[in-house]
Amino acid sequence: MDNMSPGGEMADDWEVVATFLRTTADGLLELPDVASVATGAGAEEIGSAPPPVLRYELFAELLDTSGVARLQEAAEAVARCCESHLEVVPSAEELEWIVSVAAQEPIAELAERHSTSARGMYRRLEKMWARLGVRNQVQGVALAVERGWIAPPPVRAGGLERPARL
């Protein structure tokens, strides 16, 4: 990302996020000596070492109400910028799932073919829809057709025609 140079407000957003990340990294490197004490050690082993916490003063400026709001806005702007340059493409297996869903194949059959339960298949599909940035199978199939990942389902006079099974 070093060779990318966003301009205007986006540059400001990137700087806010970068400042937060730098501050967080610095804070993580400043762990007190107690971090070297074994887990489960008693008071005698710990002695007077401070508890293993990040120092609040390193984050105070970014963690007040206005700082959090600004960081959230900046992070969302950066995420939108990144997403606009990133095309998520389904794997070959996911494409098969999308074709099966488009063909209105019962989820139980799809699940059996992939050696999982119907509930497990629903979970896999939900994760895939989320990764593709859609809310449900209708939007997922529409996205796949729009992007050219799959052919549109055949249409007949009375509605969708179910393609022959392989």
Image (cartoon, rainbow, N blue to C red):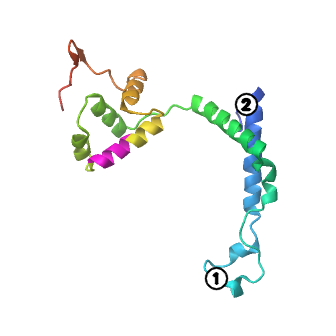
Residue at the outermost front position: 65
Disc 1 and disc 2 in contact, CB within 8 angstroms: no
- Quarter of the image with the C terminus in it: top left
Of residues 140 and 146, which is closer to you in this image?
A: 140
The kind of residue tagged 2 is Met
The residue that mark 1 highlights is 41
Magenta stretch mostly in which secondary structure?
helix
- Quarter of the image with the N terminus in it: top right
Q: Give how far across and how far down residue 91 sits, in percent.
A: 39, 38
Marks 1/2: CA distance?
A: 47 Å
Which residues fall within the magenta stretch? 118-125
Would residue 118 be found to the left or right of residue 46 on screen?
left
Q: Give how far across and how far down residue 129 sits, in percent.
A: 42, 36
- Asked where in the image residue 135 lies, by quadrant, the reply is top left
Label 1: few (<14), some (14–19) or many (≥20) C-alpha neighbours in 10 Å: few
Can residue 41 be found in the magenta stretch?
no
> Mark 1 or 2 closer to N-term?
2
Q: Secondary structure at mark 2?
A: helix
Query: Looking at the image, which residue is at 23% across and 37% down?
Result: 106
Query: Looking at the image, which residue is at 71% across and 82% down?
Result: 46
* Residue 85 appears in view: no
Of residues 31 and 66, which is closer to you in this image?
A: 66
The residue that mark 2 highlights is 10
Of residues 11 and 75, which is closer to you in this image?
A: 75
For marks 1 and 2, give the one nearer the viewer: 1
The kind of residue tagged 1 is Ala
Q: Give how far across and how far down residue 32 sits, in percent.
A: 76, 70
- Asked where in the image residue 13 lies, by quadrant, the reply is top right
Q: Secondary structure at mark 1?
A: loop
Up the image or down, 75 lies above or below 87; here it is below
